[in-house]
Image (cartoon, rainbow, N blue to C red):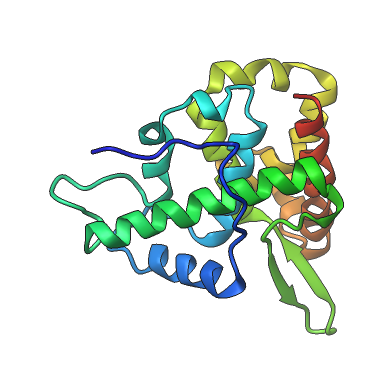
Amino acid sequence: MEYPSYNPNSDLLPLSDDELSSLDEMLLDLPVDGAMNIEALDGYLAGLLVSPQPLAELPGAAWLPRIWGGDGEEGNAPFASGKQRKRAQLLALRHLRSIAWLWEKKPDGWEPIFSVAETEEGEEVTDAEDWAAGFMSAVDLAPEAWAPLFENAETAALLEPIVLLGSDEDQLEAADRARLADPAARDEISRAIPEAVLALFGRK
């Protein structure tokens, strides 16, 4: 099956709120367990752009199917039609292009897609767990390329909030699990991510 590749010079067509919602619903409605929601997709695309492995050199088949949990064995699975598959691909590529443009031209205007909940006291708390899990899926595509960033003290510190939120709990120390159980601490860790990601991108 053929997939489009990322073209950093493609037209800039940011997704509207309705298109983001439509893509989220399309992915969540797929009959598979591994499809990303829009938050995980946003983090995944960010991870692809930060990756030491140039995305423009990576064929679409190497990263696009991860968005919907992989291709089925027959036809257009897990999508109901080729038209639906194509729409998902195009929306994902447009969102990817939009993130890259914002980082390069208007970094202060970039807002990652995080979950926001309200506490009993009426305060909003941010939770970037799904976003971070998506980012870590991008890391998993090229672990050898990412290794130097995790070994370098400065970049490892930038990656720390993403690793904390995006890793399986059984991979974390007990102290870190306790931190993540506190909504206020989770909010603080989540809010550290945007600045860290932009710093990582600026090092490329």
User: Where's the C terminus, which quadrant?
Assistant: top right
Residue found at x 72% / y 21%: 149
Measuring from the top left, give residue 165's x and y in whole percent: 67, 48
Residue found at x 64% / y 43%: 46
Name the quadrant containing residue 117: bottom right
Residue 138, placed above or below residue 31: above
Q: Is residue 187 left or right of residue 137?
A: right
Measuring from the top left, give residue 196's x and y in whole percent: 81, 40
Q: Residue furthest toward the left?
A: 74
Residue found at x 85% / y 78%: 123
Q: Is residue 179 left or right of residue 57?
A: right
User: Where's the N terminus, which quadrant?
Assistant: top left
Is residue 171 visible in the rendered image? The answer is no
Measuring from the top left, give residue 33's x and y in whole percent: 35, 56
Name the quadrant containing residue 29: bottom left
Name the quadrant containing residue 170: top right
Measuring from the top left, give residue 83's x and y in whole percent: 27, 61
Is residue 182 visible in the rendered image? The answer is yes
Residue 2, placed above or below residue 190: above
Residue found at x 34% / y 54%: 86
- How many numbered marks have been drawn onto this rendered protein structure? 0
Q: Is residue 46 left or right of residue 176?
A: left
